[in-house]
Amino acid sequence: MADAEDSLAKITLRLETGAELSPSDPSGSSSRAGDREASERAQRAIKRDLMIMQDHLADLEARFARLEPLLRAGSLVSSGFRGLRTAIKLAAGFLAAVYHWRAAARRVEEARFRSERLVFDPVGRSWARKLDGRAFAGHLRRSFGLFRPTLYRVRPRQRLALARRPRVLHAIANVWVGGSTQLILDLHDHLGHRIEMEVMTSALPTQGSHQGMTITLAPKPASRHVVRRAFSRFRPDIVHVHYWGDVDEPWYKIIFEAAAEFGCPILQNINTPVAPFAGVRVDRNVFVSRSVHDRFGSAVPATVVHPGVDLERFAPPAVADAHAFDAVGMVYRLENDKLNEAAIELFIAIVKRRPRTRVIIIGDGSLFAHFRSRVEKEGLISQFEFTGYVPYEDLPAQFARFKIFIAPVHQESFGQVIPFAMCAGLAVAGYKIGAVPEILGGAETLADTVEEATKLIVELLDDRDRIIALGERNRALALARFSVERMAIDYLNLYRELAPQDVDLLHELPDAIHFPL
C-alpha cells in the first residue's frame, strides 16, 4: 500500500510541476527531436509508475478477497451480539415489568392518557377522546426506555466547502429538547459546510438521542482533566458557550477557564434571563433578545441575534381546520424554568368562561402531574388534551389544530415556540413578560393577570376575523425577522470576527447558501 501511495505521489508531482513533460529550455533553443524524446521519456515513466501501482492494487484486492469471508463472519457475529443484547434487554424489561406490575400498569395508563386525542364526531356533532396508536407506541417506548428515538437529526443544507474547516466547540449544560439545542442544530445544518463543530455537555437526553452531532460528555461535577482532554483533541479555533448560569454555573466556569487556558476566542450566548458570565475574558456576548440585553447589559462588545425558524417547515396548512378556531394550545417543556404551577389556571379559566373551547397542552415534564390533577379536579378533562412529548418533526401538524397560541410564562428570554406559532399563522396571547412583547412587536394581546388574560383571549375566540388578521400579521413578522438563514449568516459573521488570522472562513464568498447539495 505504501508503494502504491509513493507511485501515485510521484505521478501527481510530475503532473503538477510539469517535470520531464516540457522542454528544459522553453526559449526554443532545444531541438524538436529533443523535445519529443523528453516527452516520450516522461510518458514511459508515467506508464511504468501506473503499471506498478496497478500491480499493487491488484495485490491488495487479492488480499481483501481472501479476508472477505472473515470480515463477513465478523459482521454477522457483531450483528448477532447486538441482536442478542437487544433481546436480553427486552426480556429483562419484560420481567421487570411483570415483577413490578403495578408500576408498569401505571406507566401504560399514563402513556395511554398522553395518546388520547380529541376527535370530532360529525354524526353526533360532539368531541370524543380517541386513542392515537402511533403516539401510544411512542409513549410506551419512551416510558419503558426501549428503542430510544432520534430527537434531533443534523441535515446539512450544503456540501462541504473546505477540507480543513475552522473548528467551533459548542459548550452547553445539557442537550435536552429545547431552544438552545435547536439553535446548535440549526448552526450545524446551515454552517456545517464551512465550520467543523462539536458539542460538549454535562447531560444527554434520557428520552432519546441526537444524530449527526459529535457530542463529548463532561458530567457534573465537571472534571478539569476531561475538559482539557477534549480541548486538546479537538483544538477549537472558537469556543461558543451557550450560557444558562444558575445551578449550572460551576460547570460553565470550568469550560470558560479551559477556553482561556487554551487561548481560544470565546463567544458567549446568553440564552436565559441571567447576567453574562464575567469570571474570565469573553470576546463577545450574544443575547437572544433585546429585553435580556437591556436588563443585564454587557461589559464586552455585544449584539442581539434572535434564534431563527425554519419558515418553510412551519408554514400554515393550505386549508385551515374550521374547528381550530375554537381551540387554544401551547408548546412548552412542563418545567419551572418558564412555567409554574399557576400556568394551568389560565386555561382552566378560559374553558370555564367559554365551555366550547378545547385546550391542547403539548409538552412534558415535572409539572405534568399537577396540570392533569388540576384539570381533573375542575371536571374539565373532556375539554383538555395532554399530548406529552411531541417530536420536532410533528410540531407543524400540532400547530394546525388550534388558532391561538397561549404563552402563560412567568419568565421568557426569547421562546422559539412563539415564532414557530407566528410562522404557522397563529394569533398569540398570554402574559406581558420578558421578551414576549419584543417577539410579537407589541403587547395588544398580552396581559398582566389571569383575569385580564382570560377576558382578552375569550373575546379573541369570539372574533374569527381578528384571529385571522393577527395570524397574518404574525406570519409577516416571522418571515421578516426570524429566518433561520438570516440567523446563520449573523453567526457566521461573528465567527469571522473572532477567528484567528490564520483561520480561513472564506471571506471572499457570499454569506448565503453557496454550496448546494
Image: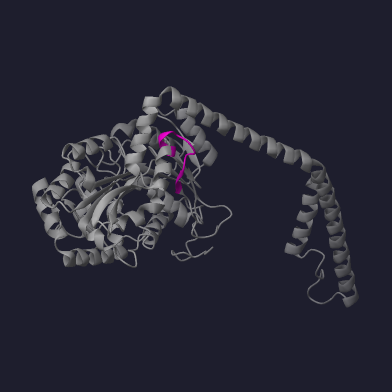
Q: Residue at x 46, y 52 (%)?
A: 188
Numbered disc total? 0
Decide whether residue 147 is among the magenta residues.
Answer: yes
Please say whether residue 435 is visible from this viewpoint: no
Q: Residue furthest top?
A: 99
Q: Residue at x 54, y 38 (%)?
A: 233
In this rendered view, identify the residue nearer to me: 473 or 233: 473
Q: Is residue 207 left or right of residue 306?
A: right
Q: State which region is magenta.
A: 141-152
Decide whether residue 138 is among the magenta residues.
Answer: no
Q: Position of residue 498 (x, y in %)?
A: 41, 51
Q: Position of residue 72 (x, y in %)?
A: 73, 41
Q: Is residue 43 above or below residue 255?
A: below
Q: Is residue 343 left or right of residue 104?
A: left
Q: Is residue 64 above or below residue 463?
A: above
Residue 484 position by quadrant: bottom left
Please say whether residue 442 is visible from this viewpoint: yes
Q: Looking at the figure, which quarter contains the C terminus?
A: bottom right
Q: Position of residue 445 (x, y in %)?
A: 15, 57
Q: Position of residue 469 (x, y in %)?
A: 20, 67
Residue 375 position by quadrant: top left
In this rendered view, identify the residue nearer to me: 283 or 140: 140
